[in-house]
Image (spheres, rainbow, N blue to C red):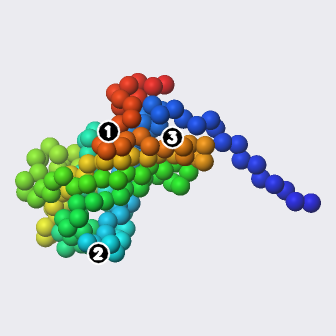
Amino acid sequence: MSTTLTTVNPPARSLALRIRDTLDRLDRDVDAWFATADPAGLPYLVPLSFLWDGRALLISTARTNPTARFLEATGKVRVALGPTRDVVLIDAEVREVIPAAELPAEVGDAFAAKTGFDPREQRGAYPYFHVVPLQVQAWREVNELAGRDLMIDGRWLSDPQTAIGVM
């Protein structure tokens, strides 16, 4: 006699709810996986802490690390948050590289408070990268794959301010 495991998925979330859940995750999560590649396409994946300011992710890593070199060379990154059954994927680009000494103190303090890591105190160069999402996708189960796009070409598909008020 065999036992079959049956999984019942909750109904797919609305676009507004997915955006709200994604914004909550960006505010709440401390770390994410950052995938970059060298100019020839050789991939590199590393976990990094981040600060979300409502429009962009702020990250920092040693300038000598492959991630920093690849971000400066290509300006492109893919970010993954959450477990495989509650994933957020972000395709983004670096809009600004900020030397630690030039970062406004309140931003550096907010980054350090959230992440528990203060790049300004590290030996060597630890620039900050201002990473702006261009495409955002989120899904939990197969029933959410069809509507996984939340942002395309840097524009949310629904007003995030409206999504924040969704209950």
Of residues 53 and 138, the one drawn nearer to the viewer in this rendering? 138
Q: Secondary structure under badge 2?
A: loop
Q: Is residue 70 left or right of residue 105?
A: right
Of residues 112 and 101, the one drawn nearer to the viewer in this rendering? 101
Residue at (38% x, 60% y) in the render: 33
Q: Distance from label 3 to label 2 (Cα)?
A: 32 Å
Residue 26 visible in rendering: no
Q: Amino acid at mark 1?
A: Arg
- Determine the residue located farthest toward the right in the rendered image: 1
Crowd class of label 1 (few under 14; some 14 to 19; many from 20; radius 10 Å): some
Q: Quadrant of residue 39?
A: bottom left
Q: Earlier in the sequence, mark 2 or mark 1?
A: 2
Residue at (32% x, 72% y) in the render: 41
Q: How many marks?
A: 3
Q: Amino acid at mark 3?
A: Gly
Q: Position of residue 153 (x, y in %)?
A: 31, 44
Q: Distance from label 2 to label 1 (Cα)?
A: 29 Å
Q: Secondary structure under badge 1?
A: strand
Residue receiving disc 2: 40
- Determine the residue located farthest toward the left in the rendered image: 102
Tag of residue 155: 1
Quadrant where the N terminus sits is bottom right
Q: Distance from label 1 to label 3 (Cα)?
A: 15 Å
Residue 90 visible in rendering: yes
Residue at (13% x, 70% y) in the render: 124
Q: Is residue 55 left or right of residue 128?
A: right
Residue receiving disc 3: 147
Q: Earlier in the sequence, mark 1 or mark 3?
A: 3
Q: Quadrant of residue 160?
A: top left
14 w.r.t. 147: above or below: above
Of residues 124 and 96, the one drawn nearer to the viewer in this rendering? 96
Q: Position of residue 162 (x, y in %)?
A: 38, 25
